[in-house]
Image (cartoon, grey):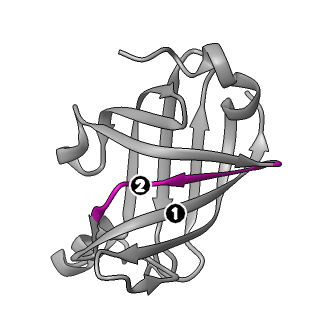
């Protein structure tokens, strides 16, 4: 196992981050400027103890009717929201989220690897090729610090 990220980069990583932008490139070179819809909302939190949590709500989500709505409406709500939590570690520029709980159960018990870069109060996390909305894509998510823990 790699070292705990808080041991090496706590001043740069620990805190709360807000999603500023998301873009992707498909495996065939198609650029997608809004893989999570227009104006998605996301928050990412890292603690000094090595814990993390992430939520992303796609832009343009429709509210569910009181009582939960029809199955199709519930499925769309589930499809357009991602949340997970667990531990994190860092090795060089490779940040790994060790998922313990997730809105997508298939992620629980898995590691999600990101390449991390910093520029001022912004951080970019780049995924390896990942299946998103039916297409294999490499996503780049830009986060801005909004608080320190």
Mark 2: give few (<14), some (14-19) or many (20+) Cα within 10 Å: some
| Secondary element at tag 1 | strand
- Please tell me the numbered disc located at residue 140: 1
Disc 2 versus disc 1: distance between alpha carbons?
7 Å
Q: Is residue 67 visible?
A: no
Residue 125 position within the rendered picture, expressed as x and y whole percent measured from the top left: 54, 51
Residue bearing mark 2: 127
Marks 2 and 1 in Cβ contact (< 8 Å):
yes
**Residue 123 vertical position relative to residue 73 in the rendered view, above or below:** above
Numbered label attached to residue 72: none
Q: Quadrant of the N terminus?
A: top left
- Bounds of the magenta span? 120-130
54 vs 10: above or below:
below
Answer above or below: position of 130 versus 120.
Answer: below
Left or right: where 103 falls relative to 88: left
Q: Is residue 62 visible?
A: yes
Q: Mark 1 Cα within 10 Å, few/some/many (few <14, many 20+)?
A: many
Q: Residue at image x 41%, y 76%? A: 25
Q: Position of residue 131 (x, y in %)?
A: 25, 66
Decide whether residue 127 is among the magenta residues.
Answer: yes
Residue at x-position 58% and y-position 65%:
41
Q: Position of residue 30 (x, y in %)?
A: 38, 86
Q: Quadrant of the C terminus?
A: top right
């Amino acid at each position: 196992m790699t070292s705990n990220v808080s041991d090496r980069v706590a001043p740069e990583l620990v805190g709360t981050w807000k999603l500023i932008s998301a873009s992707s490139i498909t495996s065939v070179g198609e650029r997608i400027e809004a893989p999570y819809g227009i104006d998605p909302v996301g928050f990412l939190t890292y603690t000094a103890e090595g814990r993390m949590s992430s939520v992303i709500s796609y832009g343009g989500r429709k509210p569910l009717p009181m009582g939960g709505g029809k199955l199709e409406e519930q499925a769309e709500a589930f499809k357009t929201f991602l949340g997970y939590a667990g531990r994190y570690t860092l090795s060089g520029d490779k940040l790994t989220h060790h998922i313990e709980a997730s809105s997508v159960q298939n992620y629980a018990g898995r590691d999600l690897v990101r390449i991390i870069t910093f520029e001022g109060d912004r951080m970019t996390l780049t995924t390896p090729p990942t299946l998103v909305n039916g297409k294999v894509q490499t996503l780049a998510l830009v986060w801005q610090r909004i608080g320190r823990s």
